[in-house]
Amino acid sequence: MSFLGIDVDTSGVKAMLLDAEGRALADASAPLTVSRPRPGFSEQTPDDWWTAVLEAVDGLAHRHRRQMAALKGVGLSGQMHGATLLDANDAVIRPAILWNDVRSANECREMEESLPSLRRIAGNIAMPGFTAPKVLWVRKHEPDTHARIAKVLLPKDYVRLHLTGAYASDMSDAAGTLWLDVAKRDWSDELLAATGLTRNAMPSLVEGSEVSGRLKRSLCERWGVRTPPVVAGGGGDNAASACGIGAIEPGAGFVSLGTSGVLFVSNETFRPNTEGAVHAFCHAIPGTWHQMGVFLSATDSLNWLAKLVNRKPAELAGMVTEGFNGPGEEIFLPYLSGERTPHNNAKARGSFVGLSHLSDARTMARTVMEGVAFAVRDCHRVLSDAGTTIASLIAVGGGSKSELWLEMIATTLGMAVEVPEDGDFGGAFGAARLGMIAATGAAPESVCTKPKIVKTIEPRADLTAAYDDQYERYRALYPAIEETSRND
């Protein structure tokens, strides 16, 4: 037996093949590009996702014929929130509006004003990243397009349509549309009506580890698969990654330091905190929810500084490590792309405060890394406000290669951060695990296990007080400059 995971990321599609024991055998990728026709707009052509899937899986099928022949389960993961609009013939009506598109800020305000129950039902603030405000924008600005909508699918679910012919989505991805009653794990007629849609425009809902369909026979023939495998519901990118890293039990979490940053924790109940801009979604595992604090510029903040000072990000991080003795005068707000948690302000912008003639590339790099660590603490604070305790925290993403960065996070959170063995535990791996559960009926906890932990980063007791003081300065800065960053 073998199992396939397909992750439809913004920058590319990744396909990963697992063996019968759940070990990674091979992977293949195909790139994607993003179109930005106007400031604040971010779009992709849905057919490019499918072309990239074919390229990636064709590569695996060519190099691993025997394992592909024994394929039993497929799982899907993908970028969340993208509005993929289809007509009655399943033709794409317009380019998909992506998660990082901010054109619908006004529509978010209108939804909240016209539907006071929105936050209670959805468990989340209306944000431009979500799908529903995007469709409301289309209704207002492209009424002819809106009138043609027969189905709205998320990116991975458009790929599922090509794989199986089924209109289906999983609970974790659907929770990010702002159309789901997240507590009930069902579409909300009230939320749909606010954007001029009904359930007829929605895919059916399954749990991430349940069967959503079977691979088409034509694709089985193309890829040399003997018997049509099941295709699992799968998950949104972070929920699928949580399955890959083993964060499915209550209190299990991970911190992801990628281009953006995520603090993720699994919950046994639905725990929204809309005032803190917490993302409260269904997990990809049945009867489980999760919360996320999301900040938009994690390693991207250090990448930005590296370009300014003509250094490589890893070089800057290494400079900070030499002689490091805690925070200085400088503070950095990492809002280069706006911010979600905890401010929900797409217009927020980054700031350096406390610069002097002594500030140089090394001190600014340290300050950027600390600003990202404080953004993680902001997320942790609002998750705590929702009654959540994180029992364990694993670090993933490119930024986790810096032990000092993880030490800053551990110190400012006051909790240990675990570092897993080298490996790819991301969306494609988690999706393949969900495909395995759907195909075999195995218990999720027996498949979605944690990787081997090779190192545990403990807080620096000698720096705890200094970082507590610096965090309070950090928190005080945003309210002081907020009015300069909003454009209502």
Image (spheres, helix red, strand yellow):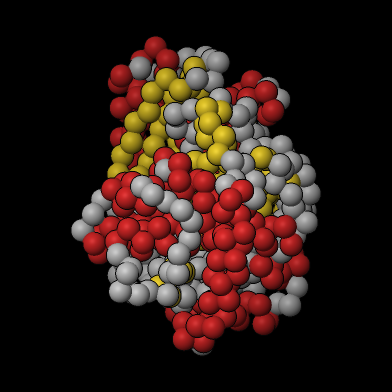
Q: Tell me the residue at 49%/41% (across/down).
A: 396
From the viewer's side, name the closer residue of 469 and 437. 469
Q: Tell me the residue at 39%/12% (across/down).
A: 66
Q: Residue furthest left?
A: 310
> In the displayed structure, does residue 207 sit left or right of residue 337?
right
Compared to 183, does 51 lie above or below?
Answer: above
Q: How many numbered circles are shown? A: 0
Q: Tell me the residue at 73%/46% (across/down).
A: 267
Coordinates of residue 473 in the picture (x, y in percent): 56, 72
From the viewer's side, name the closer residue of 284 and 479. 479
Compared to 150, does 111 lie above or below?
Answer: below
Quadrant for residue 189, please give it: bottom right
Q: Tell me the residue at 49%/27% (across/down).
A: 421
> In the displayed structure, does residue 487 sit left or right of residue 393?
left
Coordinates of residue 148 in the picture (x, y in percent): 48, 66
Coordinates of residue 359 in the picture (x, y in percent): 33, 68
Quadrant for residue 355, please give it: bottom left
Q: Residue 327, can we see it?
A: yes
Q: Residue 72, can we see it?
A: no
Coordinates of residue 54 in the picture (x, y in percent): 34, 35
> In the displayed structure, does residue 187 sit left or right of residue 26?
right
